Image (cartoon, rainbow, N blue to C red):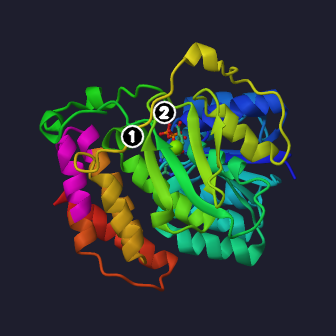
Amino acid sequence: MSAKSLAILGSTGSIGKQSLDVCRKCGYGVKALTAYSSEKEMENQAREFNPEVVALVDEKAARELKTRLADTDIKVLSGVEGVCECAVLSGADTVLNSIVGMAGLKPTLEAIRAKKKIALANKETLVAGGKLVMAEAEKNGVQILPVDSEHSAIFQCLQGKPSNRALKKIILTASGGPFFGKTAQELKNVTVENALKHPNWSMGAKITIDSATMMNKGLELIEAVWLFSVKPEDIEIVVHRESIVHSAVEYDDNSVIAQLGLPDMRIPIQYALTYPERFESPAGELSLSQIGRLSFFEPDYDTFKCINICKNAINKGGLCTAAVNSANEQANLMFRQGKIGFLDIAEKVEEVLECTAYRDEYTFDDVMEVDRFAREYVMR
Ligand code: NAD
Ligand code: MG
């Protein structure tokens, strides 16, 4: 059943803003909004959408927002707890999580426990704690609807799948990012500015750097393993420069079904909210004759080492993917701050993976401990 009212976590970000655009178009009620610190933007969003409650993680920004919204009856909360309260307590039936990073894990788990439907953009939630999230979703009978464009594509291609056995493999497409075709030698001295120039998508800074290292595709492989209960070896990554084929599935009869569209996140965001229905979208129409050509290549695994690091992590299992995710969050940040080089990102993440012990059973606190360890390791 499609969503009726939403709590949007990370509403000031790239996905958050596009989600609000979908709400404008589809007329969904917005019951809660959260962000890290942008009080001015949050004030504007709150005045337009009139939610019951808003939260900012940063205490000072939250105090400022409270003053700004004093003439309204919108409740203003602060801190991680405030974000979790927004996920749980508002009258929303669906929580759209577009927080960046594993900071999204706790609110996701709490929203599932409150039996909210989850529209998930925050892939790091599944990379860091996929086992915890999927177990909690099953226990509470909660559906997790993918927002990530590739996973939305796979989900769409799986509609009408005849049986559990019919799926042969998933074909996960990747744009290849701004450094497609470059050698490791050429990537040694690339600048943050170079890495932030994505050819097809306009996104937040962290995921744009993840696309340049192709860590994004590794994280998405892990995300697909959890969302679709497939083995890592049943996922084939294909570089597709035009970002028109958003991913595909191959069935036992060798029939391949793909989902296509212009690279506009409002299509997958809207599908996660309207599923199983479809409505008119604010996104543009695809003209295949105008696109002309679609190209596909095998990834260069030697240059873009992050993909295989992620494969190794999910094959090792346990807390290894959490370690890789947190090491990457820290290394990605330090690259953006000019503290380490582009190629150091993969190197640091690999080192953290090598010294992470496999553990099958783990809790949320164990994930947080691995997070601290991984970040400290990358910083030293
Ligand atoms: P962004 O940086 O533009 O926005 C992130 C949002 O999260 C902001 O509202 C910010 O205030 C909030 N936030 C940041 N740190 C936080 C914290 N510690 N606690 C709570 N809130 C915090 O990011 P984005 O590009 O919109 O990406 C969001 C998520 O969606 C990521 O997981 C990303 O991988 C995924 N995603 C993004 C795109 C895209 O096109 N941007 C596509 C697919 C998936
Ligand atoms: Mg994606």
Pointer 2 residue Cβ closer than 8 Å to ligand 1: yes
Question: Closer to the observer: label 1 or label 2?
Answer: 1
Report the residue at 53% width, 50% height from top.
171
Vertical placement of 200 versus 210: above or below?
above
Q: Are marks 1 and 2 in contact (CB under 8 Å)?
A: yes
Vertical placement of 128 versus 355: above or below?
above
Report the residue at 27% width, 27% height from top.
194
Estimate the x, y position of residue 377 in percent, counting from the top left. 22, 65
Badge 1 marks a residue whose secondary structure is: helix
Read off the residue under disc 2.
Answer: 203
Q: Label for residue 211?
A: 1
Q: Residues within 10 Å of mark 2 (few under 14, many from 20)?
A: some
Gap in angstroms between the C-alphas marked 1 and 2: 10 Å
Estimate the x, y position of residue 55 in percent, counting from the top left. 62, 48
First along the sequence among labels 1 and 2 = 2
Q: Residues within 10 Å of mark 1 (few under 14, many from 20)?
A: many
Question: Left of 55 or right of it: where is 346?
Answer: left
The magenta span reads 334-350
Magenta span has 372? no
Disc 1 residue type (three-letter): Ser
Disc 2 residue type (three-letter): Met
Vertical placement of 30 versus 190: above or below?
below
Estimate the x, y position of residue 371 in percent, counting from the top left. 37, 67
Name the residue at the front extreme. Answer: 253
Q: Nearer the viewer, residue 131 or 171?
A: 171
Magenta span has 338? yes
Report the residue at 22% width, 50% height from top.
302
Which SS does the magenta portion mostly show? Answer: helix
Q: Quadrant of residue 89?
A: bottom right
Q: Quadrant of residue 14?
A: top right
